[in-house]
Amino acid sequence: MGLSGISIWQLLIVLAIVVMLFGTKRLRTLGGDLGSMIKGFKNSMSSEESKKEEEEAQKALDSKNLDQKATAASPTPTTDKVDQNNTKV
């Protein structure tokens, strides 16, 4: 018994019929096309992931720069002492 009640001999007979119908050349090109399709899919998935990582890194860098600009732009409190007439002491 093979896969779900199908014996190895039945699989071989089906394979032989498929080869006779389509021929080895067409099956070879079909396999090559399928392989290139899978390769293209993997490449597009990895490029999508790298784009997302770049966007996240850019957002983190932008928010860090904004925090630094806000800190630099905020007025620093002065430590000069002033009396009641607003003159420095």
Image: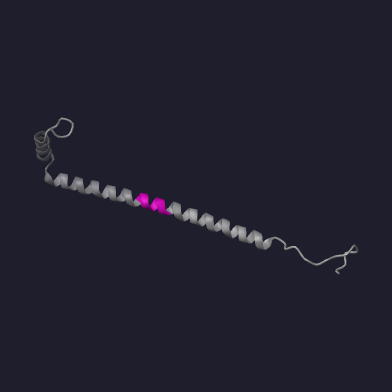
Most common secondary structure along the magenta stretch: helix
* Quadrant in the picture for residue 84: bottom right
**Which quadrant of the figure contains the C terminus?**
bottom right
Foreground residue, 54 or 28? 54
Is 33 positioned to the left or the right of 14 in the image? right
Q: x, y percentage for residue 26?
A: 15, 45
Is 13 positioned to the left or the right of 66 in the image? left
Vertical order, 79 against 45 (above or below): below
Q: Is residue 38 magenta?
A: no
Is 46 positioned to the left or the right of 39 in the image? right
Foreground residue, 88 or 57? 88
**Which quadrant of the figure contains the N terminus?**
top left
Looking at the image, what colour scheme do you see?
one colour
| Residue farthest along the right direction in this orientation | 85
What residue is drawn where x is 45% and y is 54%?
53
Q: x, y percentage for residue 17?
A: 10, 36
What residue is drawn where x is 28% and y is 50%?
39
| Residue farthest along the top direction in this orientation | 5
Foreground residue, 11 or 39? 11
Q: x, y percentage for residue 22?
A: 13, 40
Q: Which residues are magenta?
A: 44-50
Q: x, y percentage for residue 52?
A: 45, 51
